[in-house]
Image (spheres, rainbow, N blue to C red):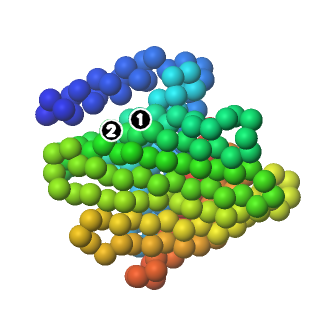
Amino acid sequence: MTTRLASILVVLAAFVATASAQVSGLLRQDRGQNGLATTVAVFDGKTGLELWGFGVDTKAPDLEIGKLFRVNSTKQQAAVLFGGYYAVWPVTGEHFAIPFAAWNTKSTIGFSGTMGYYQPLDNNFKMLFSDGMRVTTHVSGGYDAGLEAAFTAPYGSVPSYWFGPVISHANWSVRVQANAETHAIRLRTELRF
């Protein structure tokens, strides 16, 4: 085990050990032509720290730890968050700093989205990405429906774009997305607890 990976595991263990009753989580599954990919996340409401595991159904999931800070007033209808993450990809041994922004408006028509950038710490892989930018409207009974787009743009490679409908409730969402280049379809489900 590398020294960096060991230090990450210590940080993760400390994060879990200090978690309070204010902990919440997320479970996301992507089903598509490449099978099933599972992501889990833990959020500590007391410290604001986030721990993400991408590909937890594999032998060596990609890990990220970080924090987002609200940069506008809590009295405003829109939430704007900025922060970042430290990421390690155990399979390749790569490490990244990820500046990240998120926004969300709460009105009749909602606009939300994310944007991040994988800045390499010890390699040459760079990537701009968005987990999703969506436009939704409140339909009834606490449900929102709309359209979402997501993309990954690795430096020096062809970007990949996904589009499709989304329906969400307070603690879950379901998205069906089509890839603009390959025409592949993926189903992304997300549960917050």
Q: Residues within 10 Å of mark 1 (few under 14, many from 20)?
A: some
Location of mark 1 (residue): 66
- Image side of residue 145 versus residue 112, left or right: right
Residue 60, percent from left and from top: 27, 45
Identify residue type, mark 2.
Tyr
Residue 179, percent from left and from top: 46, 76
Point out the residue furthest to the front here: 72
- Image side of residue 138 versus residue 117, left or right: right
Quadrant the N terminus occupies: top left
| Secondary element at tag 2 | strand
Q: Report which quarter residue 173 is drawn in.
A: bottom right
Q: Answer yes or no: is residue 167 visible.
A: no
Residue 66, percent from left and from top: 41, 35
**Residue visible at 53% across and 60% down in the picture:** 132
Residue 54, percent from left and from top: 38, 48
Relative to residue 164, is residue 92 depicted above or below?
above
Quadrant the C terminus occupies: top right
Circles 1 and 2: CB distance less than 8 Å? yes
- Image side of residue 13 versus residue 20, left or right: left
**Residue visible at 46% across and 80% down in the picture:** 180
**Residue visible at 41% across and 60% down in the picture:** 129
Q: Residues within 10 Å of mark 2 (few under 14, many from 20)?
A: some
Sequence-wise, the earlier of marks 1 and 2 is 1
Q: Report which quarter residue 9 is drawn in.
A: top left
- Image side of residue 91 versus residue 184, left or right: left
Identify residue type, mark 1.
Gly
Q: Which residue is nearer to you in this view: 128 or 187?
A: 128
Relative to residue 28, is residue 18 depicted above or below?
above
Q: How many marks?
A: 2
Q: Which residue is nearer to you in this view: 122 or 171?
A: 122
Q: Residues under labels 1 and 2: Cα distance?
A: 6 Å
Disc assigned to residue 86: 2
